[in-house]
Image (cartoon, rainbow, N blue to C red):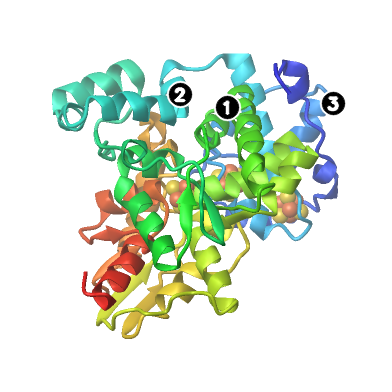
């Protein structure tokens, strides 16, 4: 695939014909619960697809409110690919209306990460200056009260860039934008956790997974990134590497979006080699290969499962692994979407809905007796940092800490 014309956005997903109009997806959609302005997944997925195919309606602006969280997909009894339909309908809406400058910026997380980290820490200070944020709200529509994640000058690719692994088990790490530019400590922790398991990590050439592009209607650019990443990562899987990721949104993109959107044998082949980091550790454990030399502790933690973890349908690998640490107690918050939803929660006109969901989550966090909150998604962490006073940690940092304590490091 090279150039993605509008014609290619006339996608062929016939699952909409199976819709029973049961409304289960709408009952489970976080945005439907936060906003009466949103038509809901049934209407803006299968029904809108039918109407656009029949040329009765070619566009519906309410599609902008869909966050692509995927909650509707996992609730549908007929396995209608609802968020695949809404992704394309967003792209068609974008073609009709044109891309706002703000959405172009938010959709290009990798470019923003490169620029913002090159000028960190100045970027981080600037993003906290109220008059500048007010100006950004006025000129760009990015809400002045939304906290931004910080950017790191010493980003992950400056620190670690091995291209090949020399160990028996081989892992190629798709780092993703957040762990590269905002949280290199997560990426470093993952590499060290693998080292404690005698696995050397390689870093393939990679571009942003495309999720922020899909969410902002930039389907053509997202498909280009998906094709690039598929080609680069297949070079590794065909040499025996497993592909592992620490960001649940990146992981879901490779497992679900790439196969649905690209519809190629290559995307399907690659998807069979993709693992969430804790899913991978759990597989090592099941095969008696996991280093379980964890230091005992006395911690009470609360776990927030990102929507994009739930969407993978792999159970709860993070809690499965953390519960192997002696004395580590972790409770699932069993909460709905955090409301940050990637770039959604930055947008002026969506901030109110984002904070409604965020404040509901904050109440749930407050009800649980815990020392800190655990989550894998950097954007969920951003929301939790804004709406709660509790520390938020990535599971890789906790696992590394336990290994290091056990080895007196
Ligand atoms: S849950 Fe599935 S079958 Fe039910 S209305 Fe939604 S798309 Fe249709
Ligand atoms: S992807 Fe999420 S926000 Fe969009 S319709 Fe489905 S449940 Fe609602
Ligand atoms: S920010 Fe987290 S909870 Fe919200 S949609 Fe994205 S993955 Fe789901």
Residue at the disc numbered 1? 217
Query: What is the tally of numbered marks visible in this picture?
Result: 3
Badge 1 crowding class, 10 Å Cα cut-off, few under 14, some 14 to 19, many 20 or more, is many
Give me the C-alpha separation between circle 1 and circle 2: 8 Å
Q: Nearer the viewer, mark 2 or mark 3?
A: 2
Front in this rendered view, residue 202 or 149: 202
Q: Position of residue 232 (x, y in %)?
A: 61, 35
Give me the C-alpha separation between circle 3 and circle 1: 22 Å
Q: Residue at x 52, y 35 (%)?
A: 206
Front in this rendered view, residue 246 or 309: 246
Q: Nearer the viewer, mark 3 or mark 1?
A: 1
Q: Position of residue 385 (x, y in %)?
A: 26, 51
Give me the C-alpha separation between circle 2 and circle 3: 29 Å
Residue at the disc numbered 3? 54
The disc, 1 or 2, on the residue closer to the chain's N-terminal end is 2
Q: Secondary structure at mark 1?
A: loop
The disc, 2 or 3, on the residue closer to the chain's N-terminal end is 3
Front in this rendered view, residue 403 or 255: 403
Question: Quadrant where the N terminus lies?
Answer: top right
* Circle on res. 103: 2
The disc, 3 or 1, on the residue closer to the chain's N-terminal end is 3
Q: Position of residue 356 (x, y in %)?
A: 37, 49
Q: Secondary structure at mark 2?
A: helix
Q: Are marks 1 and 2 in contact (CB under 8 Å)?
A: yes
């Amino acid at each position: 695939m090279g150039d993605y014309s509008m014609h290619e956005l006339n996608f062929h997903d016939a699952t909409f014909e199976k819709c029973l109009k049961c409304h289960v997806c709408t009952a489970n959609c976080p945005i439907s619960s936060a906003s009466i302005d949103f038509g809901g997944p049934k209407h803006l997925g299968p029904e809108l697809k039918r109407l656009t195919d029949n040329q009765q309606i070619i566009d519906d602006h309410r599609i902008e409110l869909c966050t692509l969280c995927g909650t509707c997909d996992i609730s549908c009894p007929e396995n209608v690919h609802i968020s695949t339909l809404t992704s394309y309908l967003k792209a068609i809406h974008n073609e009709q209306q044109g891309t706002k400058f703000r959405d172009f910026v938010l959709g290009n997380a990798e470019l923003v990460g490169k620029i913002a980290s090159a000028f960190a820490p100045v970027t981080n200070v600037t993003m906290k200056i109220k008059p500048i944020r007010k100006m950004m709200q006025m000129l760009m529509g990015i809400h002045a009260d939304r906290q931004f994640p910080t950017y790191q000058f010493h980003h992950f690719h400056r620190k670690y860039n091995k291209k090949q692994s020399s160990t028996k088990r081989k892992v190629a790490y798709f780092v993703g934008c957040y762990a590269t530019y905002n949280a290199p400590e997560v990426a470093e922790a993952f590499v060290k956790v693998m080292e404690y398991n005698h696995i050397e990590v390689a870093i393939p050439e990679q571009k942003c997974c495309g999720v922020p592009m899909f969410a902002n209607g930039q389907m053509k650019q997202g498909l280009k990134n998906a094709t690039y990443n598929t080609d680069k990562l297949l070079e590794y899987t065909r040499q025996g590497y497993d592909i592992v990721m620490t960001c649940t949104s990146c992981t879901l993109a490779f497992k679900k979006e790439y196969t649905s959107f690209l519809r190629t044998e290559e995307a399907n082949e690659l998807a069979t080699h993709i693992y969430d980091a804790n899913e991978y550790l759990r597989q090592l454990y099941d095969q008696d290969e996991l280093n379980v030399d964890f230091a005992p502790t006395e911690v009470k933690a609360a776990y927030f499962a990102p929507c994009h973890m739930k969407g993978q349908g792999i159970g709860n690998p993070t809690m499965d692994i953390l519960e192997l640490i002696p004395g580590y107690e972790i409770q699932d918050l069993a909460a709905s979407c955090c409301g940050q939803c990637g770039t959604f929660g930055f947008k002026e006109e969506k901030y109110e809905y984002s904070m409604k969901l965020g404040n509901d989550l904050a109440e749930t966090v407050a009800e649980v007796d815990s020392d800190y909150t655990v989550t894998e998604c950097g954007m969920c962490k951003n929301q939790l940092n804004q709406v709660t006073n509790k520390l938020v940690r990535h599971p890789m940092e906790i696992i590394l800490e336990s290994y290091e304590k056990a080895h007196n490091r």
